[in-house]
């Protein structure tokens, strides 16, 4: 007797093989039957004729570990579950909520708050203690935790902008080892962010070597995604090769360096899109991306285990602290705000933000990996979220628009907003998804080793609107890229979101429909599934998701979300 029988669906098992008709039987939290289950008895039957049944989607690049702290889980995560997400890999970009030490918790809190997480206190020190906290919470979806290099470095070195000593390296290695022993699935770094931007490659090699003891991967937000992308990829490969660990390159993309051309390009994109609709045009040349892919292929040919993930949007999101030069971020958010208040350092920042050209290596004085303003200009940068009531009107507006309202310059508008919001500002960057703009991303997305991540920054305020990825990232892969554009068949779309990310992080029993696997499933309409928007462009719950099971619990039933269920677990390695 099954607890649930999903009857007569199109089975897309996550392996990438062709779909087939069949049934799925669930007992407790496991799949106990798969195939033609004629005559099977069940307490509950889900009729799936005309619908597809797949493993639950795995968000390989998430920051949910920051947003789950002291927050309402339904308010924060319902939209993820409604799009079919059952597991999130968290602790990415070097940011994790543990480990920490009492005398430096305020520095880690500053880092977490800059991502829009309204966290007031960290009541733990070790990763084991943090896991105990999570396991005492009501979780909607599964969380698989990476230990963040940034958190470890703050715990040992504070905000120091220097290379570590041998003793500090050993202490950081010990913290990583303790975190992996507690159940972390790997190590992440964020080398474009404070404090990871200050470390030498050798520091990361030494920490990554600890991973070999556990057979776990190294995931990295590269040091640069602009003109130094190839150098940054080479550094990541060097670390993985030296430590003999698998490498996961986070949210692979390339930011073009446009310089003075940025405003001109933004102004003529509509014209380019109009022409492209009549006569297909080639994508915007991106030599950095082409070189980066060649370096990755060379590493694969050499036998190095390299995986990648991508956010399937032409808009990214992150904290506004990275709009300022690396030296201004030394010491964290509080020091940055001091520099903004100081007329001398403020003037220096304004000049560097608009004139700096990326160079390598990025830890040298005056170097900067991704100077967004000089690379793409002010117009593609829009406010995603702020923490106060008085500046809610800035959400979705570009800095030229905000500057016009305040009758000042874009730089002064950014500084004012940072000060009024205590540095808790998140922004989006890039261009709205349109056919010509998308062309440069389609090649990346179609790569067989490319997993999918939402990388969603969640606004601090209850009434804030998360980015589209929080509502429809995974349905978009099937609806837009597979069904509409035909980049890959639906079974490949599902593989990218299920077995591929599960294999990268050794998530046992997840990512495949097979007997004995955990019952994380999504039932969807393959002809309807997609992201959805209101008339004003605000993202809505995804279309075409009929049922979601997490650990055998039926949390979305015929499109209705069950607010009484909290089926998520901490997935310890």
Image (spheres, rainbow, N blue to C red):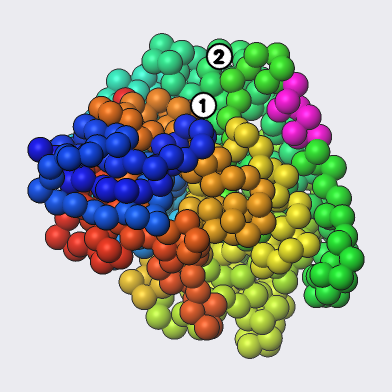
Q: Residue at x 66, y 52 (%)?
A: 486
In space, the residues marked 2 and 1 are separated at their CA atoms by: 9 Å
Would you name the residue on which mark 1 appears? 218
Residue 2, by quadrant, is top left
Query: Which of the image's four quarters has the N terminus?
Result: top left
**Kind of element beneath mark 2:** helix
Q: Is residue 504 above or below residue 97?
A: above
What residue did someone put label 2 on?
Answer: 243
Horizontally, is 86 left or right of 95 in the view? left
**Percent position of residue 173, x then y:** 43, 19
Q: Going 54% across and 47% down the picture, which residue do you hit?
A: 490
Q: Is 196 situated left or right of 566 in this image?
A: right
Q: Residue at x 60, y 32 (%)?
A: 449
Taking the image as shown, residue 309 lies to the left or right of residue 543, namely: right
| Span shown in magenta | 291-298
Give x and y (percent) for residue 318: 55, 56
Q: Do we see residue 123 in this rendering?
A: no
* Viewer-side residue, 572 vs 20: 20
- Toward which corner of the image does residue 187 lie, by quadrant? top left
The percent coordinates of residue 35 (x first, y second) are 32, 35
Asked if residue 238 lies in the magenta stretch, the reply is: no
Residue at (57%, 64%) from the top-left corner? 427
């Amino acid at each position: 007797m099954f607890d649930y029988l999903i009857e007569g669906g199109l089975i897309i098992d996550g392996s990438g093989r062709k779909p087939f008709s069949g049934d799925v039987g669930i007992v407790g939290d496991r799949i106990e039957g798969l195939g033609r289950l004629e005559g099977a008895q069940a307490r509950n039957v889900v009729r799936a004729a005309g619908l597809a049944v797949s493993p639950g989607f795995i968000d390989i690049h998430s920051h949910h570990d920051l947003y789950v702290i002291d927050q309402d889980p339904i308010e924060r995560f319902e939209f993820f579950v409604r799009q079919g997400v059952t597991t999130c890999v968290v602790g990415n970009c070097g940011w994790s909520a543990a480990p920490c030490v009492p005398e430096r918790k305020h520095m880690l809190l500053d880092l977490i708050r800059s991502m829009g997480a309204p966290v007031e206190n960290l009541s733990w020190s070790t990763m084991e203690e943090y896991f105990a906290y999570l396991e005492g919470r009501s979780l909607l979806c599964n969380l698989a935790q990476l230990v963040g290099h940034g958190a470890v470095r703050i715990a040992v070195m504070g905000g120091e902008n220097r290379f570590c000593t041998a003793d500090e390296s050993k202490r950081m290695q010990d913290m990583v080892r303790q975190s992996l022993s507690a159940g972390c699935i790997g190590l992440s770094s964020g080398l474009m962010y404070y404090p990871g931007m200050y470390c030498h490659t050798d520091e990361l090699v030494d920490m990554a070597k600890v991973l070999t003891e556990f057979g776990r991967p190294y995931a990295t937000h590269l040091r640069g995604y602009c003109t130094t992308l190839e150098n940054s990829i080479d550094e990541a490969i060097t670390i993985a090769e030296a430590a003999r660990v698998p490498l996961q390159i986070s949210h692979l993309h390339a930011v073009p360096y446009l310089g003075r051309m940025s405003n001109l390009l933004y102004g003529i994109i509509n014209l380019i899109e109009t022409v492209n609709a009549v006569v297909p045009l080639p994508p915007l040349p991106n030599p950095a991306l082409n070189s980066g892919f060649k370096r990755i292929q060379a590493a694969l040919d050499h036998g190095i285990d390299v995986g990648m993930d991508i956010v399937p949007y032409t808009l990214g999101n992150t904290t506004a602290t990275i709009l300022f030069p690396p030296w201004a971020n030394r010491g964290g958010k509080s020091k940055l705000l001091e520099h903004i208040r100081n007329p001398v350092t403020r003037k220096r920042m304004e000049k560097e933000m608009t004139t700096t050209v990326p160079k390598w290596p990025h830890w040298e004085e005056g170097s900067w990996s991704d100077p967004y303003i000089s690379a793409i200009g002010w117009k593609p940068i829009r406010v995603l979220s702020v923490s106060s009531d008085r500046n809610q009107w800035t959400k979705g507006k570009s800095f030229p628009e905000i500057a016009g309202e305040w009758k000042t310059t874009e730089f002064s508008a950014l500084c004012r907003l940072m000060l009024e919001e205590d540095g808790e500002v998140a922004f989006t960057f890039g261009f709205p998804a349109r056919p010509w703009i998308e062309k440069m991303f389609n090649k990346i997305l179609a790569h067989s080793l490319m997993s999918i991540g939402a990388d969603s920054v969640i606004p601090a305020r209850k009434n804030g609107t998360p980015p589209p990825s929080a509502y429809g990232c995974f349905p978009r892969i099937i609806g837009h890229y597979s069904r509409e554009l035909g980049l890959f068949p639906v079974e490949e779309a599902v593989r990218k979101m299920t077995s591929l990310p599960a294999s990268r992080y050794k998530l046992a029993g997840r990512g495949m429909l097979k007997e004995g696997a955990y019952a994380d499933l999504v039932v969807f309409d393959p002809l309807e599934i997609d992201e959805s928007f209101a008339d004003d462009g605000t993202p809505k719950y995804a279309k075409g998701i009929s049922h979601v099971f997490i650990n055998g619990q039926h949390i979305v039933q015929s499109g209705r979300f069950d607010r009484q269920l909290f089926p998520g677990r901490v997935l310890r390695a």
